Amino acid sequence: MKKMALIVALGALAGCGADGDPLQPSANLGLSFGPNGVSPNASVGASNGNVSVGLNL
């Protein structure tokens, strides 16, 4: 039981950013209109200070 309480407490600390800045998520959805018609685009990512990762779909 004590181990479970410790795990929950550490998870709560990590979730609120007590051990540093939390990751900030980002998302983008859009439509592009061009000579070839309409094309959808999307991107998702996360950043933490100087480090950011993303994925364009």
Image: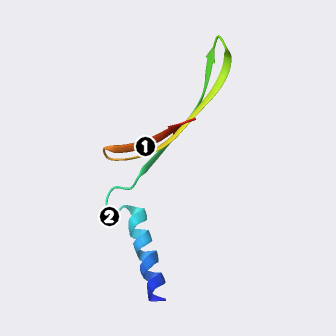
Q: Position of residue 35 (x, y in %)?
A: 65, 10
**Counting other residues with Cα less than 10 Å from the Cα at mark 1, is it few (<14), some (14-19), or many (20 or more)?**
few
**Residue 14 visible to an observer of this rendering:** yes
Q: Which residue is farthest bottom?
A: 1
Q: What residue is pinned by disc 2?
A: 19
Q: Residue at x 41, y 52 (%)?
A: 23
Crowd around label 2: few <14 · some 14–19 · many ≥20 (10 Å): few
In the rendered image, residue 11, in percent from the top left (x then y), is placed at: 44, 70
Asked if residue 16 lies left or right of residue 4, the reply is left
Give the image's coloring scheme.
rainbow
Residue pushed farthest top? 35
Is residue 28 visible from the viewing direction of this image?
Answer: no
Which quadrant of the view contains residue 57?
A: top right
Q: Which mark is residue 13?
A: none
The three-letter amino acid code for the residue at tag 2 is Asp
Which residue is at 31% across, 44% downward? 50
Residue indicated by mark 1: 53
Q: Secondary structure at mark 2?
A: loop
Provide residue 1's location: percent of width, then percent of height: 49, 89
Total marks in image: 2
Q: Secondary structure at mark 1?
A: strand
